[in-house]
Image (cartoon, rainbow, N blue to C red):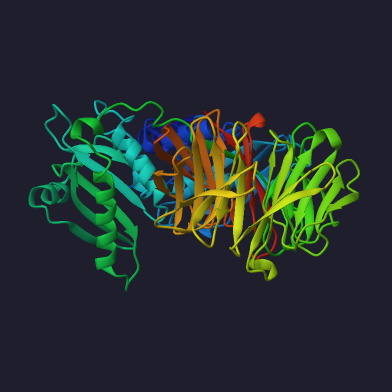
């Protein structure tokens, strides 16, 4: 009996010693914990988040970061099944109040490095698929910040004396956002007063890590290091300031596969180096503190609605909103329906079939009316918002599409005509939204006229003439063009937003994808920024002085006004492929995007983003 007790005690001591040893190999100050903490800031609706990884040199997969402790806890069978099979595990707990999504954790090149567990509050009837998609969106955001499994168990800061909230880190974040295919970006410099060249800005942590021999050779010789490392290609070269002075080294990593043009990858790397150079006035500037560098992103995905019309194919167009009635309306142009959603929950509530090819939706609450521009033969519709009956039509030429309501004059402006309906010209129609009476029409010698914006304290309308690459300035009094503002270096200007206070007009183009900022006093272009591709929406947030530009390539671009002549890209936030149109609802601090499945896709979804200060 005594011997059995001694053996049992010995086993317990050995187990305890192993547990202590296992936990001692994982630091709670590692990079994984930094990523978990940042993700929880950006997604406050998440209850629990944990990362499981096999530390370098170890055999057991353990928790390396979480918000509930348990660091060093060995992965269970479910964790390992997720890692080995690559399949996501979904589970409601026994009490029925929590929903866990456990999925493979990926690195920048898509290799599995462990498992990620995300837990949401749950009640019966909640959309499990939507919660799964939200969790996978978090995982995909983390993916761009993880070099490999070993990266996660390293320290986030190798040297605590090197600051993390610097202009260098801001430049790295903005450059990664502007180049979605870029895998890794890292800056090494000798800080003012320092003795060693260290990492001061990085997309994968390691702040304060000393430069290695390759870094120093690139600085000393000026000859770029070009290296293939499996499915990655690295360009490491001198980092220069605006005056051309060498201030350190920059490592730029692209995806790679056998047969890729290394010379082209080198050229792309040098172009990014030169892009950084143009934004670095000096070494001292790089190390200046920039508040909010590691704060929550400017927009957080908080919901997505996917369980409606799984057979839908084609494109969505624009939204309309009834804030008081908690309704969101979406024009399913290729499906020939209006889709109605609950504004608060995102749930799909109803499908309306009394439209043919809907585009713009305007809601007039005092009259309980929806006006829906319709490019089909049935003309623009007037719908009673209480029972959704069609109660009138506005007689216009075919091809009704973009629309703008001018509250200052109580006039509605609707674009008709164009190539989509076989016409070589377009019209801007001035309409009484109450009676449907058409006062006047302005003809454009254009087969593609798009967005319209109206001044509320002035006499002008701004119109995108997309096939001619200019903005037409139209007088409200005469309904005649009084100026033409050309857009140089880009074509197909489809989207538009107006900052009337600062006299700035924002215009989005597709070929290439750019955001233009025009001075409305002079028509001059004061700024041009890169933008997500295939956008069909552009929104200005006057309270935060931000611009939101969704792209069909799966990213939401967020831009900050520094002053009326200077703008910076804050982030390029993952959304969904086809999420190119949307609506800003400033009263709720929300942005809604519609993800079109395209001509050959199936389904579709509505994404809800919370706007963060």
Is residue 145 in view? no
Estimate the x, y position of residue 306 in percent, counting from the top left.
Answer: 70, 52
Estimate the x, y position of residue 380 in percent, counting from the top left.
Answer: 79, 55
Is 212 placed above or below 293 here?
below
Q: Quadrant of residue 316?
A: bottom right
In the rendered structure, the answer to whether residue 292 lies left or right of residue 334 reads: left
Q: Residue furthest front?
A: 478
Between 377 and 60, which is closer to the camera in this rendering?
Answer: 377
Is residue 296 in view? yes
In the rendered structure, the answer to whether residue 114 lies left or right of residue 351 reads: left
Total numbered circles: 0
Q: Quadrant of residue 99?
A: top right
- Name the residue located 28 percent from the left edge and 41 percent from the top edge: 279
In the rendered structure, the answer to whether residue 522 lies left or right of residue 471 reads: left
Between 496 and 567, which is closer to the camera in this rendering?
Answer: 496
Between 46 and 249, which is closer to the camera in this rendering?
Answer: 249
Estimate the x, y position of residue 574 in percent, counting from the top left.
Answer: 52, 48
Estimate the x, y position of residue 229 in percent, counting from the top left.
Answer: 28, 60
- Name the residue located 79 percent from the left edge and 43 percent from the top edge: 433
Q: Residue furthest left?
A: 221
Between 121 and 223, which is closer to the camera in this rendering?
Answer: 223
Is 538 placed above or below 424 here?
above
């Amino acid at each position: 009996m005594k011997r059995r007790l001694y053996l049992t005690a010995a086993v317990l001591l050995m187990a305890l010693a192993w547990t202590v040893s296992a936990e001692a190999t994982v630091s709670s100050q590692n990079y994984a914990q930094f990523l978990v903490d940042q993700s929880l800031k950006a997604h406050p609706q998440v209850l629990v988040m944990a990362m499981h990884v096999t530390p370098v040199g170890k055999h057991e997969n353990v928790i390396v970061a979480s918000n509930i402790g348990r660091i060093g806890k060995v992965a269970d069978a479910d964790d390992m099944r997720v890692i080995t099979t690559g399949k996501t595990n979904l589970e409601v707990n026994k009490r029925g109040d929590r929903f866990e999504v456990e999925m493979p954790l990926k690195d920048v090149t898509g290799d599995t490095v462990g498992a990620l567990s995300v837990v949401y509050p749950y009640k019966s009837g909640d959309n499990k698929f939507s919660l799964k998609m939200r969790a996978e969106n978090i995982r995909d955001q983390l993916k761009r910040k993880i070099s490999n499994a070993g990266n996660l168990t390293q320290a986030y800061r190798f040297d605590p004396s090197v600051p993390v909230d610097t202009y260098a880190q801001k430049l790295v974040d903005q450059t990664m956002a502007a180049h979605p295919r870029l895998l890794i970006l890292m800056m090494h410099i000798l800080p003012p007063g320092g003795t060693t060249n260290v990492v001061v800005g990085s997309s994968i942590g390691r702040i304060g890590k000393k430069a290695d021999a390759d870094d120093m050779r690139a600085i000393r010789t000026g000859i770029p290091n070009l290296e293939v490392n499996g499915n990655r290609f690295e360009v490491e070269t001198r980092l220069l300031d605006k005056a051309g002075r060498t201030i350190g080294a920059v490592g730029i990593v692209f995806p790679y596969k056998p047969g890729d043009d290394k010379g082209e990858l080198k050229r792309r790397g040098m172009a990014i180096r030169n892009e950084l150079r143009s934004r670095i006035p000096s070494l001292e500037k790089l190390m200046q503190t920039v508040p909010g560098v590691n704060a929550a992103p400017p927009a957080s995905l908080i919901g997505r609605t996917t369980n409606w019309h799984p057979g839908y194919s084609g494109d969505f167009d624009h939204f309309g909103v009834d804030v008081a009635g908690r309704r969101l309306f979406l024009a399913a142009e290729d499906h020939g329906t209006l889709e109605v959603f609950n504004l608060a929950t995102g749930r799909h509530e109803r499908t309306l079939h009394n439209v043919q090819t809907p585009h713009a939706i305007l809601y007039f609450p005092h009259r309980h009316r929806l006006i829906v521009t319709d490019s089909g033969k049935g003309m623009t519709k007037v719908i009673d918002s209480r029972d959704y009956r069609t109660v009138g039509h506005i007689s216009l030429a075919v091809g009704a599409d973009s629309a703008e309501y001018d509250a200052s004059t109580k006039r509605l402006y609707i674009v008709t005509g164009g190539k989509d309906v076989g016409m070589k010209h377009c019209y801007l129609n001035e309409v009484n939204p109450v009676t449907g009476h058409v006062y006047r029409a302005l003809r454009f010698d254009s087969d593609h006229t798009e967005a319209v914006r109206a001044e509320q304290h002035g006499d002008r309308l701004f119109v995108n003439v997309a096939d001619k690459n200019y903005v037409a300035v139209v007088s409200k009094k005469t309904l005649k063009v009084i100026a033409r503002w050309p857009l140089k270096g880009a074509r197909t200007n489809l989207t538009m937003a107006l900052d009337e206070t600062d006299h700035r007009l924002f215009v989005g183009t597709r070929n290439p994808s750019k955001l233009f900022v025009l001075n409305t006093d002079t028509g001059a272009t004061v700024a041009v920024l890169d933008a997500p591709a295939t956008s069909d929406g552009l929104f200005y947030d006057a309270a935060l002085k931000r611009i939101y530009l969704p792209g069909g390539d799966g990213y939401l671009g967020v831009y900050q006004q520094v002053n009326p002549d200077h703008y910076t890209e804050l982030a390029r936030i993952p959304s969904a492929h086809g999420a190119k149109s949307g609506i800003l609802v400033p009263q709720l601090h929300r942005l809604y995007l519609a993800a079109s499945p395209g001509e050959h896709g199936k389904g579709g979804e509505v994404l809800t983003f919370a706007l963060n200060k």
